[in-house]
């Protein structure tokens, strides 16, 4: 059992890409926190990403679904949860086009279940009645895709109207709104962060950068949707973790904060960069880029995402440490270890 002196925080989806980067970072930085990681282990969850913290007395993994109200309520009371950082979500846009239902279930219903259970648990406590939430904060990890798509110019700001285009982004927009409503209606202490495209170690194979590396190493076609000119704003995952940490601890209640890397790249530029790193690190006869294959576009494919991160920079002192050149180099190195034994 955890030390009662420590504050216990519930992290959901901690076996996923961002969560499994965040938990070791957070445990190391805050020795006075216990962490319960609730993760249902879908195809995208991988406990081996958390091997470094397995067995730590301040860490407990629970396999389970955020939609399971009974389980969620049990966790709140059993561990006296005093904060939630909610990562758990279905996240892959292509999957949401093929099978939207599971996105609504996990992202909308799951967020509601968790939020409502947190509110009821905290509200019933004497410390809530007397002094407010005492740091019982609900932090929702969200995405810049809620804002829809940009043309060649402009940036997403926190006051940009929501205009989600895919079932995935619509489900995240909905869950943001539910979180917002618990702040506005019940005065619950909430914060939302909306991030741009993350990259780095431990990302699931389905995403763009792991797909490029894996296919290149296998000598199979690297599929690029449409004309390859779609732009994403790439954020190194540990810079994102630092932004979440700052927003969780110091963000103003009821606010949302955009976190973005200021690294806009077209998908073709990403292929170029990753393939040229592979050419240097694992040379073969032909250039890896020759494997590039333009394929049918994603339905409703958003053209450009780019974030104005000045609110979190100015208010909370966040800044990205990693530039794209250094971040992508580390990322490629990590995947080379994963995909080939050297
Ligand atoms: C997998 C794949 C992707 N793409 C294109 C589609 C996008 O324009 C870009 C990145 O795609 P990916 O699926 O890696 O990521 P996004 O659709 O931008 O969304 C991601 O970043 C946001 C912020 C989230 O919130 C999502 O959860 C996260 O999945 O590459 C290809 O051209 N070929 C491919 O094989």
Image (cartoon, grey):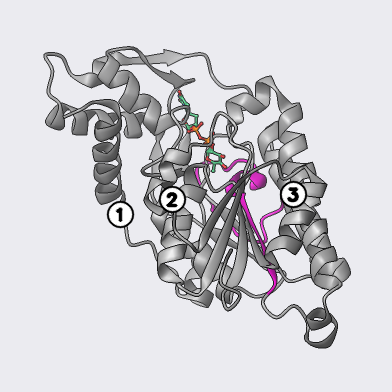
Callout 2 secondary element = loop
Q: Quadrant of the N terminus?
A: bottom right
Q: Secondary structure at mark 3?
A: helix
Q: Which residue is depicted at the point 73% across and 30% down?
A: 102
User: In the image, residue 217 lies at what x, y percent?
Assistant: 26, 20
How far across and how far down the image is residue 299, in percent? 62, 22
Q: Which residue is mark 3?
A: 111
User: In this view, which residue lies farthest toward the front?
Assistant: 1
Residue 54: mark: 2
Residue 12 on the magenta span:
no
> Would the CB of label 1 be found within 8 Å of ligand 1?
no
From this view, report whether residue 255 is shown above or below residue 280: below
Q: Quadrant of the C terminus?
A: top left
Q: Is residue 262 visible?
A: no
Q: Earlier in the sequence, mark 2 or mark 3?
A: 2
Q: Indicate yes or no: mark 2 CB to ligand 1 under 8 Å.
A: no
């Amino acid at each position: 059992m955890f030390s009662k002196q420590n504050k216990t925080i519930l992290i959901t989806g901690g076996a996923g890409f961002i969560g499994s980067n965040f938990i070791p970072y957070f445990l190391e930085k805050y020795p006075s926190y216990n962490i319960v990681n609730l993760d249902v282990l879908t195809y995208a969850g991988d406990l081996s990403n958390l091997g470094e913290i397995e067995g730590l007395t301040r860490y407990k993994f629970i396999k389970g679904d955020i939609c399971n109200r009974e389980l969620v309520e049990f966790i709140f009371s059993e561990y006296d949860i005093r904060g939630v950082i909610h990562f758990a979500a279905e996240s892959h846009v292509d999957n949401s086009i093929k099978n939207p239902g599971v996105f609504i279930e996990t992202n909308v219903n799951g967020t509601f279940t968790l939020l409502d259970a947190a509110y009821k648990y905290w509200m019933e406590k004497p410390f809530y009645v007397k002094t407010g939430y005492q740091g019982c904060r609900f932090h929702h990890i969200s995405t810049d895709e809620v804002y829809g798509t940009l043309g060649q110019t402009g940036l997403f700001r926190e006051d940009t109207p929501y205009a989600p285009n895919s079932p995935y982004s619509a489900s995240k927009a909905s869950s943001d709104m539910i979180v917002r409503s618990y702040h506005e209606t019940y005065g619950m202490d909430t914060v939302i962060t909306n991030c741009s495209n993350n990259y780095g170690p431990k990302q699931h194979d389905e995403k763009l950068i792991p797909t490029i590396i894996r296919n290149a190493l296998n000598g199979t076609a690297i599929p690029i949707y449409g004309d390859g000119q779609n732009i994403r704003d790439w954020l190194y995952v540990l810079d994102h973790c630092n932004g979440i940490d700052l927003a969780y601890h110091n963000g103003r209640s009821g606010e949302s904060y955009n976190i973005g890397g200021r690294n806009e790249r077209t998908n073709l530029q990403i292929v170029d960069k990753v393939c040229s790193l592979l050419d240097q690190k694992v040379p073969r006869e032909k250039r890896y880029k020759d494997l590039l294959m333009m394929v049918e576009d994603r339905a409703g494919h958003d053209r450009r995402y780019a974030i104005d991160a000045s609110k979190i920079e100015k208010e909370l002192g966040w800044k990205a440490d990693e530039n794209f050149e250094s971040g992508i180099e580390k990322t490629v190195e990590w995947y080379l270890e994963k995909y080939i034994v050297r």
